Image (tube, rainbow, N blue to C red):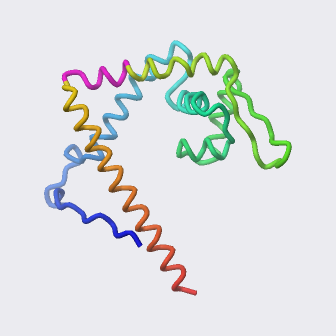
Amino acid sequence: MNSPPIPADFYQASEFRPEISVGYMMRRVLASILADADQELAAWDVTHAQWMPLFKLYNCGQSTVAGLARDLQLDPGATTRLLDRLEGKGLLRRERSTSDRRVVHVALTPEGQAIASQVPEVLCRVLNRHLSGFTHDEWMLLRSLLERILANGEALRLSQSAAAAQGQGGAS
């Protein structure tokens, strides 16, 4: 069984303020990036919630509704509503599988492909604006630190899943 990472002790409840929380700062950075991207993508009448599945489909060609929900970390109901809007705009199409009626395939229309092809250029401009004043080394360090936080979170999630599975197995 994987052991969870040993927690740091940087934060203390008696001195905690949200504005010094790494999580709070990351949420604010993400909100700023998404707002900037939304502003740029408004010319194509799509929001960040809408360009994410378009771009995902652009990169993988086709997916299922369930696969897209999993990849976007959305619940299936929210994914269906999102796809309804995109299909209404003529940006994607859904087709029920002929071999399994429970499976719905999703693919971009030519209009959806045209918009999705613009996303990398827009995101590069947005991200580069948010990294103004950073040196290349600072950018690489930031990426490395974020990767470490993600790895710690993944290790924690895996150890919690293993502990939960072990607890269920022992309760029989």
166 relative position to 70: left or right? left
Quadrant occupied by the N terminus: bottom left
Give the residue at x 25% y 46%: 22
Q: Which residue lies furthest to the right in this view?
A: 98
What percent of the width, then of the height, locates residue 40?
44, 16
Quadrant of res 16:
bottom left
Examine the rendered structure and indicate whether residue 159 appears above or below residue 135: below
Examine the rendered structure and indicate whether residue 129 appears above or below residue 11: above
Q: Which residue lies furthest to the left in this view?
A: 15
What percent of the width, then of the height, locates residue 95?
79, 35
Quadrant of res 65:
top right
8 relative position to 51: left or right? left
Main structural element of the magenta stretch: helix, strand or loop? helix
Give the residue at x 40% y 67%: 159
123 relative position to 5: left or right? right
Examine the rendered structure and indicate whether residue 172 appears above or below residue 80: below
The magenta segment is 125-133
Q: Is residue 127 magenta?
A: yes
Q: Is residue 51 magenta?
A: no
What percent of the width, then of the height, locates residue 42?
50, 16
Quadrant of res 25:
top left
What percent of the width, then of the height, locates residue 114?
60, 16
Quadrant occupied by the C terminus: bottom right
Examine the rendered structure and indicate whether residue 88 appears above or below residue 149: above
